Image (cartoon, rainbow, N blue to C red):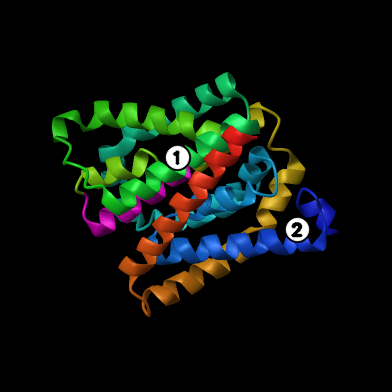
Amino acid sequence: MTPADLVPGGTPAMLTAVIAVFVLAGVVKGVVGLGLPTISMAMLALVMAPAQAAALLIVPSLVTNLWQARPWPTLPHSLRRIGAMQVGICVGTVAGALWLGAPSGQWAGVALGLALIAYAAWGLFGTPPSVPRRHEHALGALVGAVTGVITAATGVFVIPAVPFLQALNLGKDGLIQAMGISFTVSTVALALGLWINGGYSPNAAGSSVMMLLPALAGMALGQWLRNKLSARMFKLCFMISLAVLGAWQVARGWGG
């Protein structure tokens, strides 16, 4: 199997760059618990079409998020809290895929940039209010639908899902598990949306599987670093970097 069979543009240098992106994205996820699809899409979109980048991240994102969704005994309780949100994500992603098509072109680049800036701003300055229990399901379904449309357009599924999950006051472990569940559902829904638009072929699936190992290696390294570094400082640098990269994406899209 040659580099051309694994990544668009298929040169050894391109393959090396893509592997490096997944290692870096895995490190980020290992340290802060999220960010693999976000940073993967942001960096891969610089060198390939957003739809191609989204197809590459499906398997690494799915496996790492399933791992994060543990422990299984507490899964039913978490699903009772966020089940309506997951339905909204599925409906929004599929509807967005049918409406917008696969992530592509200038508009997708601008939308991705805006999503990154919004995510970084929330990470730096946001303090979401608590959501009353009686409104969790209705608001969750709405947040899920909006997240799904953004997922279909950009391949990134953190906005507004993560701020909403934080607002549920699930506790540290509960929040990590809820993000794992939500990201898993979003990944599956994104794969379905890409398949609907012809962007998730058997070849794309095979390439995505090949990116699993560097993502897992990066995640293991990130978990090791989490015990050695200040996660707060790391997350601060990460959010600022995402904001800068997002602004560049927006400027390039509007200027191009």
Asked whether 181 falls inside the magenta stretch, the response is yes
Give the position of the N terminus as an image quadrant.
bottom right
The amino acid at mark 1 is Ala
- Please name the amino acid that badge 2 sits on: Met
Mark 2, other Cα within 10 Å: few <14 / some 14–19 / many ≥20: some
- Residue 56: image location, x then y, percent: 65, 48
Q: Position of residue 156 (x, y in %)?
A: 50, 42
Q: Is residue 178 visible?
A: no
Residue 115 numbered tag: 1
Residue bearing mark 2 = 14
Question: Vertically, is 21 above or below 252?
Answer: below
Residue 248 magenta:
no
Residue 137 visible in image: yes
Residue name at image x 42 percent, y 44 percent: 117
Residue at 27 percent of width and 53 percent of height: 174
Residue 218: name its quadrant: bottom right
Q: Which residues are magenta?
A: 170-186
Looking at the image, residue 88 sits to the left or right of residue 255; the answer is left
